[in-house]
């Protein structure tokens, strides 16, 4: 009986190990919501702007009178914090959780851009169209340095890093660092 129990534990451990071995490449990255947290009274325009976007999108997906009021309030909050930060991040943009914008001023994002979880975007970054309506898609845990421009229907792989003032016009592979205008790879893996 004891031996059978031991065998069961061992096979469970083996399965867990196999799952653990697969996790880094296959499990979707979980958003780290603590990166967006702030206390109610804390002066933090970047997180306040994000909170207004989160509140709007949450209220839009729920129905009812209260949700309608919350949505309208979120629109006003979004106007206010957009003026304070000088950032243009539309209310409908698909932003993965755990987004960090340490200095949000001058960030401009096209409304159809998709951004993965746990990304970091510095000041004066533009994510937008080029010569047709295609927009960038940004993977998970991507860091975009100050002043970088990512233009057109490019795909930025997970864990990529975009150097300050880069102009990205082509896809960037996962875990790759690119710099310059036009951006070129200078490093792999992180
Ligand atoms: C791109 C970045 C992440 C690379 O960091 P790293 O892995 O430590 O790379 P290194 O510093 O070793 O640089 C590698 C090469 O790229 C060059 N390089 C780095 N950043 C560059 C940039 N933004 N533009 C042009 N070239 C750059 C380096 O000169 C070096 O070239 P070399 O091999 O010919 O000497 C970093 O330089 C960067 O731009 N971070 C953004 C930081 C930021 O925006 N901060 C804002 C704070 S308010």
Image (cartoon, rainbow, N blue to C red):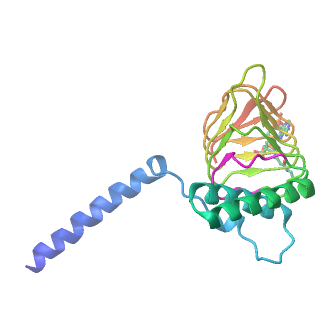
* Residue 75 x, y percent position in the rendering: 77, 56
Where 127 falls versus 77 (above or below)? above
Left or right for 84, reference 93: right
Q: What stretch is highlighted in magenta?
A: 88-100
> In which quadrant is the N terminus drawn?
bottom left
* Residue 106 x, y percent position in the rendering: 89, 46
For this orientation, the residue located farthest to the front is 65
Left or right for 48, reference 71: right
* Residue depicted at x 28% and y 61%: 14
* Residue 36 x, y percent position in the rendering: 71, 64
Q: Would you identify the image quadrant in which residue 48 lies?
A: bottom right
Depth order, front residue of 187/84: 84
* Magenta stretch prevailing secondary structure: loop
Q: If the picture is divided into quarters, which one holds ligand 1? A: top right
For this orientation, the residue located farthest to the top is 131
* Residue depicted at x 92% and y 58%: 84
Q: Would you identify the image quadrant in which residue 148 lies?
A: top right
For this orientation, the residue located farthest to the left is 1
Magenta-drawn stretch contains 18: no
Depth order, front residue of 24/106: 106
* Residue 49 x, y percent position in the rendering: 80, 59
Residue 186 in view: yes
Where 144 falls versus 30 (above or below)? above
Depth order, front residue of 176/187: 176
Where 76 falls versus 171 (above or below)? below
Q: How many marks?
A: 0
Left or right for 34, reference 130: left
* Residue depicted at x 57% and y 55%: 61
């Amino acid at each position: 009986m004891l031996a059978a129990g031991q065998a069961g534990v061992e096979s469970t451990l083996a399965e867990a190990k196999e799952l653990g071995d697969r996790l880094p490449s296959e499990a979707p990255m979980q958003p780290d919501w603590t990166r967006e947290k702030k206390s109610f009274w804390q002066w933090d325009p970047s997180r306040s702007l994000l909170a207004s976007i989160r509140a709007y999108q949450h209220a839009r997906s729920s129905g009812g009178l209260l949700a309608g009021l919350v949505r309208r309030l979120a629109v006003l909050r979004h106007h206010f914090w957009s003026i304070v930060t000088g950032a243009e991040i539309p209310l409908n943009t698909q932003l993965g959780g755990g987004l960090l914008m340490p200095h949000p001023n001058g960030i401009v994002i096209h409304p159809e851009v998709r951004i993965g979880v746990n990304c970091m975007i510095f000041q004066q970054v533009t994510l937008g169209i080029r010569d047709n309506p295609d927009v960038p898609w940004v993977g998970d845990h991507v860091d975009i340095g100050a002043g970088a421009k990512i233009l057109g229907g490019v795909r930025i792989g997970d864990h990529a890093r975009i150097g300050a003032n880069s102009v990205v016009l082509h896809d960037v592979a996962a875990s790759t660092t690119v710099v310059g205008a036009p951006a070129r790879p200078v490093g792999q893996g992180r």
